[in-house]
Image (cartoon, helix red, strand yellow):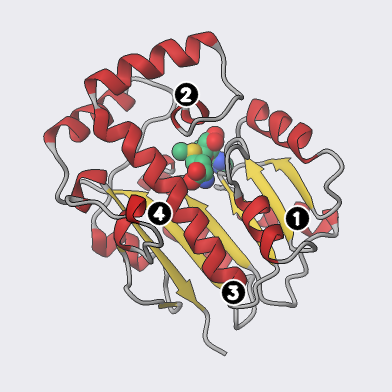
Amino acid sequence: MYDYFLGGAHNFEIDRQLAEQIASMTPNLADTMRAGRAFLRRAVRYLAAEGIDQYLDIGSGIPTVGNVHEVAQDANPTARVVYVDIDPVAVMHSKSILDGNEWADAIQADLRQPELILDEARKLGLIDLSRPVAVLLAGVVHFVPDADHPGDVIRTLRDATVPGSYLVISHSTYEDQPQEMLDAQKLSARTATEITLRSHAEIAGYFGDFALVEPGLVHLPLWHPETPGDVDEHPERFGAFGGVGHKAG
Ligand SMILES: C[S@@+](CC[C@H](N)C(=O)[O-])C[C@H]1O[C@@H](n2cnc3c(N)ncnc32)[C@H](O)[C@@H]1O
C-alpha cells in the first residue's frame, strides 16, 4: 500500500483497493506518506552535500520512486547504501531492484536488534563504522512500542557511529493532528503494524547528544523545502515530525 501511495509499481491489486479505500477516508494519510518520503529525499540530498557517502536505512520499505540509493548515488556514484527491513517481501523486492548495483544491498532484520543490524551491515562490507555514516530511521520508530525501549535501541545505533555522523528520524505524532489522522492511527491498533504516536519532546530525545540541524525537529514540509510542492499551508496536518541530528567532532 505504501508503495502504491508513493506512486510505485511494486504493489498488488489488493494493496491498491485497500489504499484507495483509506485514501478516500483519510486524504491526509496518503499525503503524509508522500511528505515522509519527500522529507527523506531532501535529508539525503542534504547529507550528500555534507559529504556523507554511507547510509544505513532501517525500515526502508521497498526502494521505490526516488529512493535513498538513487538520491545518494546521484550525488556520489559510489555512495554505499544498506537497506534494512523486517518485512521479507520488502527485502526481496529491494534486492531485485538493487541487482547489479555493487554499492547497495538489503538485509532482513529487526530494528529492535540493533547490534545484529550493525554486525550484518559490517559483514556486507559496505558500511565502515570507523568513518561517518548516516543512520536513517524514517517512518519506522513509531512501529516500536514503548515496551521494546526505542530510546535504548536508538542509543545503541548512535553510540556505534563516529563524530561527523548523522541521524535522520521521521516519526508520527499526536501533537497538532486533525482528528481524522488520530482515528486512522487508532485503526492501526487492529493490524499487525500498530503505531505508537509520540510527542515532540519524546522524538527530540531520540537524538541524544546529536545536535539538531536547523530548523530542528519540525513538521515534515518545514524541513528544508526545495520546491513549491514541498511546502504546505497547513504543515501540521501531516501528523509527523522530521529532523536530522549531527554528532559533533
Ligand atoms: C512507513 S514504511 C517507511 C519506509 C521508508 N523508510 C520511508 O520513509 O519512505 C515503514 C517500514 O518499516 C518497516 N518496519 C516496521 N517495523 C520494523 C522493525 N521493527 N524493524 C525493521 N523494519 C521495520 C516496515 O516493514 C516498513 O517497510
Q: Position of residue 114 (x, y in %)?
A: 61, 54
- Say whether disc 2 or disc 4 marks the residue closer to the N-terminus: 2
Which residue does the numbered mark 4 point to in the structure image?
170
Q: How far across and how far down the image is residue 190, in percent?
A: 33, 20
Residue at 63 percent of width and 73 percent of height = 161
What is the distance, in whole Å, between disc 2 and disc 4 at their CAs? 19 Å
Compared across the picture, whether 194 is left or right of 37 comes to: left
Q: Amino acid at mark 3?
A: Ala
Mark 3 Cα shell of 10 Å, populated few (<14), some (14-19), many (≥20): few
Q: CA distance from mark 1 to mark 3?
A: 23 Å
Residue at position x 25%, y 64% from top? 201
Q: Residues within 10 Å of mark 4 (few under 14, many from 20)?
A: many
Q: Disc 3 to disc 4, how far (Cα)?
A: 20 Å
Mark 1 falls on what kind of element?
Answer: helix
Q: CA distance from mark 1 to mark 4?
A: 22 Å
Whether label 2 touches label 3, CB < 8 Å: no
Which residue is denoted by mark 2 in the rendering? 1
Amino acid type at circle 1 is Ala
Tell me, yes or no, whether the two marked residues, 1 and 3, touch with CB atoms within 8 Å: no
Tag 3 residue: 49
